[in-house]
Amino acid sequence: MRYAETGYHLEIDLARGNIERVETDPKLTELHLGGLGTSVKLHWDRVPPETEAFDDENILTVSTGLLNGTPAYSANRTLFTFISPQSGLLAYPMMGGFFSAELKYAGYDKIVIRNKSPKLVYLWIHNDKVEIRDATHLKGKGALETQDLIREELKQPKAQVAAIGLAGENRVFTASIEQSRSSASRLGGGAVMGDKNIKAIAVRGTKDVYLARGAEFMSLMDEVTEYINFRNTNPIPDVMTILSGIGSPQEMKHTDEKWHTENFMWGNARTRRRDFWSKDNEANWTNAQLTAIQRLISCFNCPQQCGALVASPDSGSRYMMKCFGKLTYAMASYVDDLNFNFRILQRATEYGVDSFSTPQILAFAVELYEAGILTDKDFEGCPSDKEGRFFWLLDRVAHREGIGDILADGVYYAARKIGKGAEKFDHNTIKKHEQLPLKLGMLDPIYYLMYSTNEKISITQIEGNFPQAAFPTREQREAFVRDWIQVPDDRFKQYVLEWEPRGDKSIPYFPTPQMCSEIVDWMEMLHNIDDALGICAGMGSFCLKPPYHIHNYPKLISAASGMDVDEAGLKKIVNRSRNLHRAFNNRRGMRRADEKPPEDHWKRRFPELEEELLSTYYKFKGWNMNGVPTKERLIELDLGYVAEDLEKRGILKDG
Ligand code: 4KX
Ligand code: MTE
Ligand code: MTE
């Protein structure tokens, strides 16, 4: 009997139309848990390092996590893994919603998709019955529209459907995969799905998932419930509103957007409007948000409501919105009316594009036009107002028409194709991927490390448990650490107590490189655990003082799966997967030279300190000075076969 997991993968070869149900080795769960962990292992074993995003060999894996389908709150992530067309590295966007539990109940932990279909198809998984069905009639349909059409066609109103829109079909590098109230958004999963000619994946499952020690698991969940209730009624004081509670940033619940609008940049990550949140703007934005929201919504088995069903002012039809996506198009276009964001996001969601990267690409194009690098010829037929321009550009990108065809590859590649100095306007990518539009004053050593080294290449997927900035007063710091049960070690409390906004004990020199390494490692470890278990980071790694943490996770995992795992064991498992992920990317060429935030991310930079930070962190992680795990570290993590491979390829020399 397998507990928590189903013990089966669904293997689909699109070229041959072959479908297999394959039993997995339980040893892999012990070594990598599930979710991202086991997906990384699968890609290491099966995807040759020279594979490019649109090669047949680029496997697309759709994965549940170890706890999906169990009664664990917020175990609702579905992860997609593939070589990204944008970064060329192993990407793992993920979505909440309802898909992963449904897939588990259908009897599968992962869907592993190989090769390409000769024509547009969708997959229909209904327990043991699995079909590859014609989708040519769905060509060009919106990502949300497709989900409804498939449910109708199958006469399965309860089926969960993940679909791509036109952008995915056209292999736009920022194409997303959309599913009801969620989205696997970043790094081009939609493009890889489109390249494989899969319009959608529909699933319906009615089987059971078993717990090893059910009563014990439920009593642990009682403690989690108690904590959630406590946190919901006791928001953390003295931090920005969206991070004062739990759940992924609660931007649909709160209307206070002072933090984003005044600290994040407008345009192509250009202008900080420190006085934006005036009484007038606050009133207008609040009104726009409250009018558009139909109701707040949750993902599968989640007590929080981070998303909202929204009806945009002119269409009336509904779609889902959450988090910073609420603002990205308005801020990138310098449109002060929040209703614009509600309108354009709806079209963007139907096209299926990442709402973080895409507005950056559009803003980049506008800048190039204003600088004379793109010309009237490139913009022929484009309206001259800010809103019209963004809609027009979005349409061009999704259709890959005219200048849109170049922009559809993202800022990095578009800049190089356009030339004529356009490269200078590509100032906000890391590893060829658009970042959130933040440009701050003083180098932040913790964020420096996270931006540089995170395998997801996206800050919200590594930050979280440690406060973003020093608390101004000693009293505030003491209050913050008082009930901080989530820390893996009490020394983190001391770091918060000593950390000052200014002076000797402030950024960039404090926390020290060693402390920063420990802090980043902790935050990243929690993200890796969440991503292996399929738990929403809003309940674990993304927020301050979350209900799930390093002290209760091992107990929950043991009770659910029957595995004998303690804190040290859990840390070792996720370190193993994390190092395998890094080795996978090293094998694809990623090195120290690639690990750098944009030059203008901070006004005040400290080159020597930055090198020291990186070297200290590499050493802490057991990596060599090129950012490659050492032989010793790999052997310690039972990854001797990885060391051998890296040595054979000349990537690891002298250990
Ligand atoms: N000594 O750097 P600042 C996320 C100066 S994304 C001397 O502009 P501040 C989500 C500066 O040089 C992650 N001087 O930043 C969540 C500057 O001087 P200037 C976002 C020092 O305004 C949901 C001035 O002070 N977080 O979480 O303080 C959805 C202002 O500084 C100094 C981060 O990136 C020192 N020690 O705060 C999507 C982490 N320190 O005016 C995404 C960092 C500073 O002359 N976070 N100065 O240029 C932060 O820093 C704060 O949270 C933030 C910026 C963002 C409010
Ligand atoms: N893009 C689309 N299309 N829809 C979304 O809901 N969410 C944004 C961003 N892009 C979102 C989106 C937010 S809030 C986050 S944190 C990231 O995608 C999540 O990235 P991931 O799905 O790649 O993990
Ligand atoms: N959960 C995990 N495990 N990993 C993540 O990176 N991102 C969070 C949250 N849950 C994240 C996660 C953030 S920042 C957001 S806004 C939402 O997921 C995005 O929700 P969606 O994927 O359901 O669209």
Image (spheres, rainbow, N blue to C red):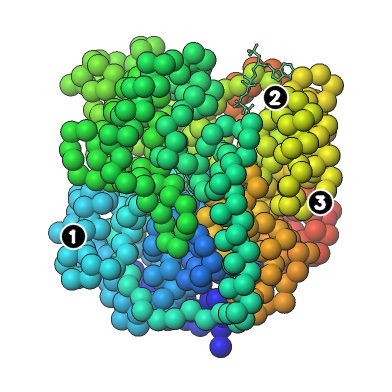
Mark closer to the observer (2, 3): 3
Name the kind of residue labelled 1 in the image.
Leu
Of the pair 405 and 526, the residue shown nearer to us: 526
Q: Is residue 483 left or right of residue 149?
A: right
Q: Residues within 10 Å of mark 1 (few under 14, many from 20)?
A: few
Q: Is residue 520 left or right of residue 543?
A: right
The answer to whether one can see residue 287 in this image is yes
Q: Residues within 10 Å of mark 2 (few under 14, many from 20)?
A: some
Name the kind of residue labelled 3 in the image.
Asp
Coordinates of residue 526 in the picture (x, y in percent): 66, 53
Q: CA distance from mark 2 to mark 3?
A: 26 Å
Q: Are marks 2 and 3 in contact (CB under 8 Å)?
A: no
First of labels 1, 3 by sequence position: 1
First of labels 1, 2 by sequence position: 1
Of the pair 248 and 602, the residue shown nearer to us: 248
Residue at (21, 58) in percent of width and height: 148
Residue at (36, 25) in percent of width and height: 285
- Tell me the residue that label 3 is attached to: 489
- Tell me the residue that label 1 is attached to: 149
First of labels 2, 3 by sequence position: 2
Q: Is residue 411 above or below residue 201?
A: above
Of the pair 45 and 651, the residue shown nearer to us: 45
Residue at (71, 43) in percent of width and height: 520
Q: Is residue 624 above or below residue 632?
A: above
